[in-house]
Image (spheres, rainbow, N blue to C red):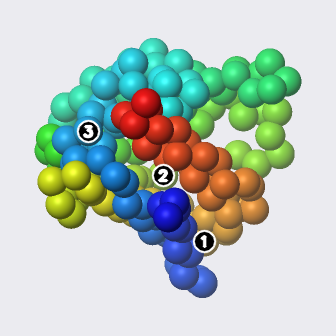
Amino acid sequence: MELKTRVHAEAGKQELVITREFDLPVELLFKAYVEPDIVEQWMGTKVLKLDNKKHGSWHFETTDPKGNKHDFHGVIHEFVPNQKITRTFEMENSLASAVRFPAQLEFLEFEKLTDKTSKLRMHIVYRSVALRDQMLQLPFAQGLTMAHNRLQDFFNN
């Protein structure tokens, strides 16, 4: 049975909780979020910077189908190997999009289920309920599921 990424959005709250179980040891799941070469492959983005430590920062760049470049960046506030990453997320160069998104706070928790399986829990906090709801209007959940499927497949091939 295929594992799916689940997005939970409680009405009236400015947050999302995203969960996904993987057929991967927690060490590989965590590695997929911190190794630039691996991140580039499953996220389909270019990693310009990924400084994995407390007070570190990250910067990714992607190009949409129309050739527009988009920059994503943030600051890492907490970094505990194989357990958690707390970071901010901002998107720049989104002029091609009618929706603008200011900084959001992301809490990523990596949990060992068995020696061969793990779970990712992402708790994302937006500045307002309206911004959270705007994100949900985009094909956000579908894109995240596709990316997580690529992550799973990266280690299985």
Give the quarter of the image for residue 22: bottom left
Distance between the Cα atoms at labels 3 and 2? 26 Å
Q: Nearer the viewer, residue 94 or 118?
A: 118
Residue for point 54% across, 81% down? 10
Q: Which residue is mark 1?
A: 129
Q: Which residue is mark 2?
A: 104
Residue for point 34% across, 52% down? 23
Q: Is residue 86 above or below residue 19?
A: above
Q: Which residue is mark 3?
A: 28
What's under tag 1, amino acid-wise? Answer: Val
Residue for point 80% across, 26% down? 65
Residue 64 % position (x, y): 75, 27
Q: Quadrant of the C terminus?
A: top left
Disc 1 secondary structure class = helix
Disc 3 secondary structure class = helix
Q: Is residue 20 above or below residue 51?
A: below
Left or right of 45: which side holds 33? left
